[in-house]
Image (spheres, rainbow, N blue to C red):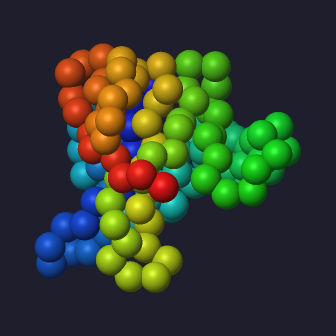
Amino acid sequence: MLIYILPFYLEGVGDVCKVKDEKGERIVYIKLSNMLKNIFKERMLDFKEVRRKCRKVLNQKNIIPLVLNEKEILLPIKIRKPRTSRDEVYGYINFHFIDKIEEGEILLKDGQKFFYRKL
């Protein structure tokens, strides 16, 4: 079960992503968008089709939640300022692992805190 996937800049490497699931937290040396596509592919889901359906249901084009299954609803959260144009600034946190949302921070059920930027 995926808990979060966040964009992260690693000095000397570039854009990578932090992923936390039931196996623990790890850094994956690919961009967040490619990691999302890989996760959907592993679960035999069509990434483009899931995004299309979510857009249609929400009547929104960009920055939409992604649904893997009923226990994994990934909410987009703006994590950092863009470093360049087309920089990935949105991470995804599983809705079911969010304990509390306060001004500027999200608290997960395991005690981790994430700071988010306002839109």
Q: Is residue 98 above or below residue 5?
A: above
63 or 50: nearer the viewer: 63
Tell me what residue is drawn at x 52 percent, y 51 percent.
36
Tell me what residue is drawn at x 64 percent, y 25 percent.
69
Q: Position of residue 92 (x, y in %)?
A: 46, 43
Q: Position of residue 37 (x, y in %)?
A: 57, 54
The mark tally for this picture is 0
Tell me what residue is drawn at x 39 percent, y 38 percent.
4
Give the image quarter of residue 9.
bottom left
Tell me what residue is drawn at x 61 percent, y 53 percent.
63
Q: Position of residue 19 (x, y in %)?
A: 33, 43
Q: Is residue 93 left or right of residue 10?
A: right
Residue at the far front in the pictured view: 103
Q: Is residue 84 left or right of residue 40?
A: left
Q: Is residue 4 above or below residue 1?
A: below
Is residue 29 among what the camera can see?
A: no
Residue at the far bottom in the pictured view: 85
Q: Is residue 20 left or right of residue 31?
A: left
Q: Quadrant of the N terminus?
A: top left
